[in-house]
Amino acid sequence: MDKNPGQPLLALDRVETFYGPLQALRGVSLTVAEGAITAILGNNGAGKSTLLSTILGVLDGQPRQGSIEFDGLAIDGMATEKIVRAGISYVPEGRRLFPELSVSQNLTVGGYIRRDRAATRRTLEQVYEFFPLLSERLSQPAGTLSGGEQQMLAIARALMNGPRLLLLDEPSLGLAPILVRQVFDIIQGIRDEGVTILLVEQNARMALSIADEGLVLENGSVVIQGPAADLIDNDEVEALYMGVQTRSPQSGSGT
Ligand code: ATP
């Protein structure tokens, strides 16, 4: 899967996104290296989710300025379905599973865009290896899984597209600390299989502990970026993002 490790797989150049009159992204430029985990940090409302939505093209207001390239292909202005077909998958904040559908059906939905059935079957086998617990609960309605299991299913569903780039929006949200660790171990494992990861997180310390690169968004602008190891030691990042948890990890369905 990893065609050009270390080379930019995704590149944003001076991207601006608006919600009506509100400017949510201001001249955002960044690159995501193939085979790496890049962590996007920042407080509530900084523009992190908007960044992922902008990449995926799911916002009504497309970026009014700037360009987005994925593997050399200009994807800004492209329909989301085409962007997904090009190899980008998304795990939304709050998971957004189909709670009435079974684990198995949720996984099938995740792979709907693929035409190559043999490849889909191979991915399913890999997903079962990655998430043995899910393979034991295939007929269980997704809504009856625990919070941690639902997060695993949301990630597994996104992998069913066979992506080269996985966008993850706050995978730790609402999970107890022990489950957060498990989810982050899985994210690392997915990267080790060659999938490039762009990870939005409020849990800065945990995100930087597995990331190769990190950047901080503030009020829609990139204010700090660099190797994750440097950001962990950066006093400003420490003071702003590692002292206080803005949301309780125990909130929501934290089991
Ligand atoms: P959070 O961690 O709370 O999700 P975030 O860093 O992901 O925050 P965004 O959700 O991207 O931030 O929001 C960036 C800005 O855009 C905020 O001012 C927010 O209020 C605004 N915003 C987000 N979504 C919409 C929308 N659908 N319509 C209008 N404004 C929006």
Image: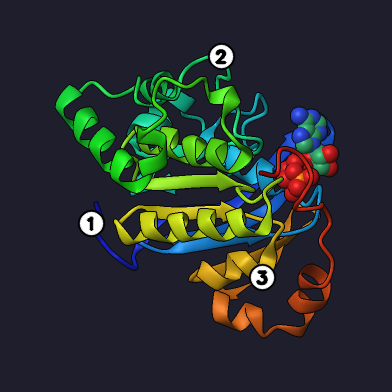
Ligand 1 image-quadrant field: top right
Q: Which mark is residue 124?
A: none
Q: Position of residue 243 (x, y in %)?
A: 82, 72
Q: In percent of the image, x 51 and y 62: which residue is there?
A: 38
Residue 209 located left or right of residue 163? right
| Mark 3–mark 2 distance (CA, rounded to whole Å) | 35 Å
| Quadrant of the rendered image containing residue 74 | top left
State the residue position of label 2. Answer: 100
Image quarter of residue 6: bottom left
| Residue 8 sits in quarter | bottom left
Q: Nearer the viewer, mark 3 or mark 2?
A: 2
Residue 222, image x, y percentages: 69, 62
Ligand 1 within 8 Å, label 3 CB: no
Any part of residue 74 in sight? no
Which residue is label 3 attached to? 205
Question: Is residue 160 shown left or right of residue 208?
Answer: left
Q: Secondary structure at mark 3?
A: helix
**Mark 3 or mark 2, earlier in chain:** 2
Asked if residue 56 shows in the view, the reply is yes
The type of residue carrying mark 1 is Lys
Q: Classify residue 170 as left or right of residue 142.
A: right
Q: Are marks 1 and 3 in contact (CB under 8 Å)?
A: no
Q: Residues within 10 Å of mark 1 (few under 14, many from 20)?
A: few
Left or right of residue 244, residue 50 in this image: left
Label at residue 3: 1
For disc 2, does the CB lie below 8 Å from ligand 1? no
Q: Is residue 185 depicted above or below 62 in this figure?
A: below
Going 74% across and 36% down the picture, which residue do you hit? 18
Asked whether 147 or 86 is in front, the reply is 147
